[in-house]
């Protein structure tokens, strides 16, 4: 019975994620888009505006949300970049760091309001400066 319950719960979780995925694809407005974040036996559906930053960890990505929540997901940073690209407007995601979380830019680093310092690649530096100044 326990194995059945575990398998059945996993099937329901997958069905919920698939349903959310299909709803995301069908959305006409980017504001209705939600990221699917599986965590243990639960799944969270998060608006991109709740994402403060995404940080690579080999083939995984740490997704930092508002209110000091973070999750390690089995997706690459590149995948998140592609998913979040429609939200590259001011006040949204720029180089996988939300613009309004950046306190200042200096010496190839972005200093965030929470004190975190992130190195910015030379390739991304001009783009980040342009987006941050806008």
Image (tube, rainbow, N blue to C red):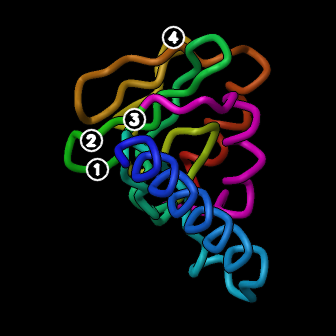
Pointer 2 with pointer 1, Cβ within 8 A:
yes
Marks 3 and 1: which is nearer the front? 3
Separation (CA) of disc 4 from disc 3: 29 Å
Q: State yes or no: discs 3 and 1 in contact (Cβ < 8 Å).
A: no
Residue 113 placement (x, y as % from top left)? 26, 36
> What residue is shown with label 1?
66
The reply to whether the C-beta atoms of the residues labelled 2 and 3 are less than 8 Å apart is yes
Observer-nearest of 33 and 16: 16
Distance in Å between CA atoms under marks 3 and 1:
12 Å
Instruction: From the image, tell me which residue sits under label 3.
Output: 71
Whether residue 21 is situated above or below residue 93 in the rendered picture: below
The percent coordinates of residue 3 (x first, y second) are 43, 41
Structural distance between the alpha carbons of marks 4 and 2 = 28 Å
Discs 4/1, front: 1
- Give left or right: position of 69 versus 41: left
SS of the residue at dot 1?
loop
């Amino acid at each position: 019975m326990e194995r059945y319950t575990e398998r059945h719960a996993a099937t329901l979780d997958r069905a919920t994620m698939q349903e959310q995925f299909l709803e995301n694809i069908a959305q006409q407005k980017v504001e209705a888009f939600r990221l699917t974040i599986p965590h243990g036996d639960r799944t969270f559906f998060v608006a991109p505006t709740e994402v403060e930053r995404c940080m690579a960890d080999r083939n995984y990505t740490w997704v930092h949300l508002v209110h000091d929540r973070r999750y390690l997901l089995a997706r690459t940073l590149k995948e998140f970049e592609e998913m979040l690209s429609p939200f590259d407007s001011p006040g949204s995601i720029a180089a996988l760091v939300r613009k309004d979380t950046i306190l200042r830019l200096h010496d190839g680093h972005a200093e965030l309001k929470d004190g975190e310092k992130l190195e910015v690649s030379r390739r991304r530096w001009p783009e980040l400066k342009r987006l941050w100044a806008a």
